[in-house]
Image: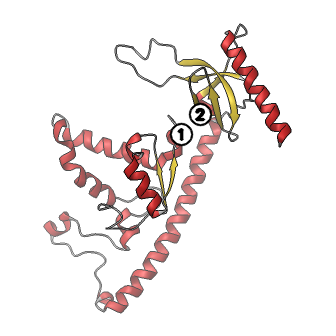
Amino acid sequence: MDSIISKLWCPLEIHRDQRKNVDDNVIRKLFELLEIIKTRTRAYHRASNDQFERYNCTLAQMIRCFTKKRQDSWDVHLQQFTGAIRATENRQTGFTPNFMFFGKENIQPIDLVLGLDAPHRTREQTELTDYIKILRKALTEIHVLARENIKMAQWRQKRDYDLNVNCKVYRVGNIVFKIDSVRNIWVCPKLKTPWEGSFVVAEVQSPVLYKIRNKKTSEGFHHDRLKLSQIHDLPIWTQGLMKRILEYSKRKILDD
């Protein structure tokens, strides 16, 4: 409330990861009061939050280059790092975040050191009304160009992704394994089995999202984190679970 809403605006929707620190009672009540919609990413699937993950990657690289042996004080310089990113031209939009947000480039410390005048200061902006007109026109043109640049970047990313994509299709009742991404202490990830299971596909949530179940848990996963099982001698509990899921699916189809 104090850091974002009071200074900028009240968001209509917040897209977040799987962390639990945004799920406490106070945050939930605040979101209900302000009618903010919450959406979540899929577990271990960075593509559903790619812009933020890319930002974190850039920020982590800056922290590593700057701190080196002084890793206990990286948070002291965090605002300077983010300020540098906001003053850097984005590869997708073609503009800096400062220019997208304010309609002009902010004065940087290097401008003051070198005695450079800010590029947005012109005689046409001496009058307030003229400045507002110019700013409104600039913001409109900036966002139109940014949307066009983003569309081109999305098309290139989709083209590159589709070259190697292999969409896997599963049906309700299929036995699958999931990638084990959990790292345990004293266990070398290179020596452990990369797949965990078996699980039964309980629901097809979308063409690429599946809900899987075992004896204890029920989770949703992206298709590229699952693999069809080739095991024929299934445990008794797996056979029973698969039978119950198939019967429930048939009843649901008949009811519909």
> How far apart are labels 2 and 1 at the CA level?
7 Å
x 48%, y 25%: residue: 181
Q: Picture coordinates of residue 179 (x, y %)?
A: 55, 24
The residue carrying pointer 2 sits among few (fewer than 14), some (14 to 19) or many (20 or more) residues within 10 Å by Cα, namely: some
Q: Secondary structure at mark 1?
A: loop
- Residue at position x 38%, y 74% from top? 103
Q: Which mark is residue 221?
A: 2
Check the image and report above or below for 81 versus 35. Answer: above
Based on the displayed image, in which of its 4 quarters is residue 240 positioned? top right
Q: Given the image, on which type of amino acid does mark 1 rest?
A: Arg
Q: Residue furthest top?
A: 233
- Residue 189 in view, yes or no: yes
The structure residue drawn at horizontal position 41% and vertical position 87%, both measured from the top left corner, is: 133
- Identify which residue, 1 or 140, lies in the foreground: 1
Colour scheme shown: secondary structure
Label ID, residue 42: 1
Q: Are marks 2 and 1 in contact (CB under 8 Å)?
A: yes
Side (left or right) of 165 relative to 79:
right
